[in-house]
Amino acid sequence: MRKRNFLLYLFLGVFFSVKAQNGPEIYPTHWWVGMKWNKLQLMLRQKGMADQASVSLSYPGVHLIKTERTENPNYLFVDIEISPETRAGTMQILIHHGNLVSSIPFVLKNKRPGNGTEYARGVTSADLVYLLMPDRFSNGDPSNDRFIDMNDTNCDRQNPYFRHGGDLQGITDHLGYFNELGVTTLWLTPVIENDQALTNEGKAFRSAYHGYAFTNQYRIDRRLGGNEVYGEFVKAAHAKGLKVIQDAVYNHVGDQHFLYLDQPSADFFNQWPSYTNTSFRDQPLVDPYSSDSDRLVTVNGWFARFMPDLNQRNPMVANYLIEYAIWAVEEFGIDGWRVDTYFYSDRNFLNRINQALYDEFPHITVFGENSMQSVTGQAYYCQNNIQTSWKSNLQGVIDFQWEGGALAGLNEPFGWSGGMLRLYNILVQDLLYKDPRRNQILLDNHDQDRFYSVVGEDFNKFKAGIVLLLTQRGIPQLYYGTEILMKNFKKPSDAEVRKDFPGGWKEDSVNKFLSSGKTVQENEAFEWIKTLALFRQKSSAISTGNTMQYVPKNGVYTYFRYDSKQTVMVAINSDSLPRNLAVSRFSERTGGFTRFRNVMTGDILPIGDLKLNEQEAIVLELLK
């Protein structure tokens, strides 16, 4: 009898050991005790595992709610509830197949300290966001440039469409550079695994170096360094006083994602009788007269053939995405989310995932990429003052409407509604937003022509644009390389505006991270941004103050940022001729002050009429 028991225990020990090594995938990979999201849906995946299987568990404080199957026998969905009293430890999930029992360990951890103070701090209008593409910024670890077991093994800097080897270590190596420039927040295009094969787009094969075609949300791409290196990067950034925004995609995944290759159910993705692309049109989503068919194509159409469209109306899809979002914040300690292709997702799901993040991390920031055709449409998809039946809970948007107005103000001839009047009129519509200061404003990004090229490489226009970016309401975002006048149009492709940062690779002939590697004008551009960025870090008027703008006249746009502690005056002459500016017009804001301090030069002069050169922008702090 004892011998039989010994052999049984030996068999079970070997069986459990094998299962531990070759057990099913489980998502989330682990969780934490004390979380508000304590009703967790675990996704278990292994070939045939759901066939006639039942589940049990025994762990103090954890209750099994139910087990769900789909038509694919490779998946089990296990719903559990974790009570507030549950302690950290390793829970065993038992899978029963007749008389055989396998055990899957699931770790419950203690939460990291400092929610809202050391991580998940959120981003405000006091911050300056620096957007960069990891693959194009700096290669700190050449050993991870390629892996032979991944679908894309290419790494070739001579090919604009292939990976170039930039990684998280390269960014970490230059954290001091961001401090010097006056940046407070880093936004990286997606770092999640994109184990995609090359795709044929526009008669050229391209890699997924951009990061927007996920193949497993729970893995940081190994070519960027992997999960451990990402965690160390966030920790190092925080130590340097820098926040980190992670780029999210809820709308789609890559066609090599395991959920697409091995779909749990037919309704995990938005399916069509034949391939249907999104129309990319936002109007049907806000148009009171739109048709159901137009709205359906916008939301359920695919963004690209190699990016399958997720169906967030399926509760299992929604839970998978929500739990990952919470998991990533707690696991890596990031401070906020930028959500790609925002309005293409189901709008009720969007409110649900936002609220889950707000509940768990009260200070976190979430803003969405809403490239809409109107201010009304843009405001509709964030917290707003519009009377509609559906209300968005998104805090703010990437303000492409502001960008269009700013670029028009710099480039268009001044007229009744052109030039700086375009920007003025955009801001007039701020009454639609609950808080427009939560919008992220920009002059360009990784999907657009570079700002310096858009203004015709006119250095005065460049400086004026930077003044707008760093003194207007909202959270300013600077695209990598703008500070060294990187340029180009998207001709023939996006790759032209995603060039490598010079000096990010050991073999580079120049290093523009150093002043010695920059030209005279590049150094001037860097110093112009740095001076204004460091000023705004200490400026309560710009960071959190009010705005008063005056109707532009003769091409001159004047506005004030002010609060009870400080008043800042900004005047921009967009004309090709010098203009005089009578300060008496602004007496309701200048009254009680006697002097101007030029923020960019430090010069102090008595308050009086001003003369602005052509395309000149001035920033003046008012003194008693």
Image: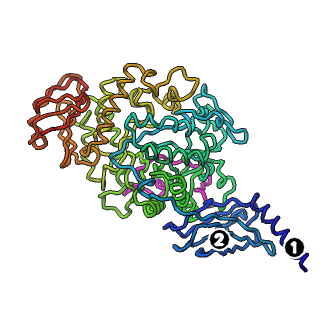
**Segment tinted magenta in the rendering:** 267-296
Position of 248 with respect to 74 (left or right) is: left
Q: Is mark 1 on a helix, strand or loop?
A: helix
Q: Which amino acid does label 1 sit on?
A: Phe
**Residue density around tag 2, few if under 14, some if 14–19, many if 20 or more, within 10 Å:** some
Is residue 176 left or right of 265 when viewed as pictured?
A: left
Q: Is residue 565 visible?
A: yes
Mark 1 is surrounded, within 10 Å at the Cα level, by few (under 14), some (14 to 19) or many (20 or more) other residues, namely: few
| In front: label 1 or label 2 | 1
Q: What element carries label 2?
A: strand
Q: Does the magenta stretch include residue 248?
A: no
Q: Which mark is residue 6?
A: 1
**Colour setup of the view:** rainbow
Q: In which quarter of the image is residue 622?
A: top left
Q: Residue at x 31, y 50 (%)?
A: 436
Residue 345: % across, % down: 49, 55
Q: Residue at x 34, y 23 (%)?
A: 458
Label whose residue precedes the other's in the sequence (1 or 2)? 1
Residue 288 covered by magenta stretch: yes
The answer to whether 79 is drawn above or below residue 200 in the figure is: below
In the rendered image, the quadrant that contains the C terminus is top left
Percent position of residue 408, x then y: 31, 34
User: Can residue 306 be seen at all in this image of the molecule?
Assistant: no
Amino acid type at circle 2 is Glu
- Foreground residue among 121 and 385: 121
Label of residue 524 in the image:
none
Q: Disc 1 vs disc 2: Cβ atoms closer than 8 Å?
A: no
Image coordinates for residue 393, horizontal then vertical, percent: 39, 59
Count of marks, rendered view: 2
Name the residue at 29% across, 36% down. 468
- Which is the main secondary structure of the residues drawn in magenta? loop
In the rendered structure, find residue 68 and report the number of the disc placed on it.
Answer: 2
